[in-house]
Structure formats: structure tokens, C-alpha cells
Amino acid sequence: MHIVLFEGDTMKSFFYGILGIWVMIACVCPAAPEPAIVPAPGQWTVDMEFTHPQQLALPRGPDNKPVNFWYIIITMTNNTGNDVDFYPKCDLMTDTFQIIPAGKFVSPMIFEQIKRRHKSKYPFLESLDNAGNKILEGEDNTKDIAVIWPDFDTQAKSVKLFITGLSNETAAVSHPVAKDDMGQPLQIFLRKTLELDYSLRSDQALRSDSSFSYQGKRWIMR
């Protein structure tokens, strides 16, 4: 992995270039679709509860320096009346434009530590990677899943967690620039996603569970 550092005018040019791209996209794109208030026939969304982010620090490397990981536990209950498919995608996004997929650089040992920590409350806790692709119907089939991310940008002041896979609702929008072979705008398919919003109350050196200040949740298409 290569890390590129920007200084002075180069950094300013890079920042304003990125800002310009976002402004252009915002001007070209129509308003993003929103999830349906009343589900259409055949659409479903499972019931979900979640914990707020918690920290797990484990020594790694030759110097045994603690490395931080962050996780939430989601509890899903399928009351739709039928077994449903489960194809999750869970991302952490900082206000510095860093996007981290859940499970990236996370070894199975991390999950085992989390499972031991919560064995009394969540005796059947599963990792996201091994949760399977079905959620069976009924309270007896409730699933508890740990969603884990590595540490993120030390300069971040806020983060958003995106949990996709809780619903089969989708929407298609036209790409603002890209075209297909027929010259038509490429279609981008969005999925109903739960967004959890947090601000951070301290610098990275003091970052802990209590650093996360919950700002709210909403359903979006992403």
C-alpha cells in the first residue's frame, strides 16, 4: 500500500479538485431516491436493534503495540412471514472521505475476543462473514451478528455506519456521466440501507467507546 502526502498548494489543489467533482455531481444528478414510506407488494425489511460502537484493543506486531478495532452488534428478527435472503454490506465512512468495509484486515481472533466478551448476553453471536445468507422467519430465529472494522482516520470528527442487507428494497438511478454501449446512461442500483450517525468527542489518542456521540439514524438508498 502506498501513502501519498500532500503539502501546501498541492494539498489545496487536491482538496478543491475533489470538492469541484462533488459539486459537479450534485448539480448533474437528480435528487437521490428515498425508501418507500409504504412498502410495495413483495418488499420487506427485517426488524433490527443495534449497539453503539465499542472498542477492542489487541497487541499486535513485534512490539505488541495495541491496535484498535471497532464493532457493533446487530440483532435481526424476521417478522415478514417468510424466510428472507441476507446479503449484507456494512461500511464505516468518516468525514475525511475514508470508507472502510466491515471485516477488512480483521482476523478471526478479533471476533473470538468479542464473542467471549459478550457471551452472557449474546450466547449465539455470529461474525458477519459466517452469518449465512438466510434469515429464517420468527422470533426463535433471531440473529445476533458482530460487525467489525479496523481503526480509522485519526483526523476524523464524525463517522457514519451503513448497514445494508436488512431489506430487499432497491432503486435504479442513471449515472451522471458514464454511458453504456448504446449511449444510454449506465444504471446504478441502490439498496435500502440503515445509516447510523456519530460525532467524535476527543482526539485519536484518547478515543474510546465514550468518544462516540450518537446523532441519530435514518433509512437511505445507497
Image (cartoon, rainbow, N blue to C red):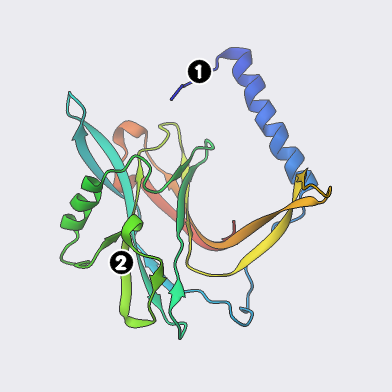
The answer to which quarter of the image holds residue 169 is bottom right
Against 22, residue 49 (above or below) is below
The residue carrying mark 2 is 144
Mark 2 neighbour density, 10 Å: few (under 14) some (14–19) many (20 or more)? many
Q: Is residue 33 visible?
A: no
Q: Is residue 78 visible?
A: yes
Against 153, residue 163 (above or below) is below
Q: Position of residue 132 (x, y in %)?
A: 36, 65
The answer to which quarter of the image holds residue 141 is bottom left
In the displayed structure image, the side of residue 186 where residue 53 appears, left or right? left
Please tell me the numbered disc located at residue 5.
Answer: 1
Amino acid type shown at disc 1: Leu
In the displayed structure image, the side of residue 40 where residue 124 appears, left or right? left
Q: Residue furthest front?
A: 181
Q: Residue furthest right?
A: 183
Q: Position of residue 64 (x, y in %)?
A: 17, 28
Q: As rendered, which of 79 and 6 lies closer to the eye?
A: 79
Amino acid type shown at disc 2: Asp
Alpha carbon separation for disc pair 2 and 1: 40 Å
Please tell me the numbered disc located at residue 109.
Answer: none
Against 38, residue 69 (above or below) is above
Residue found 47% across the figure and 55% down from its top: 89
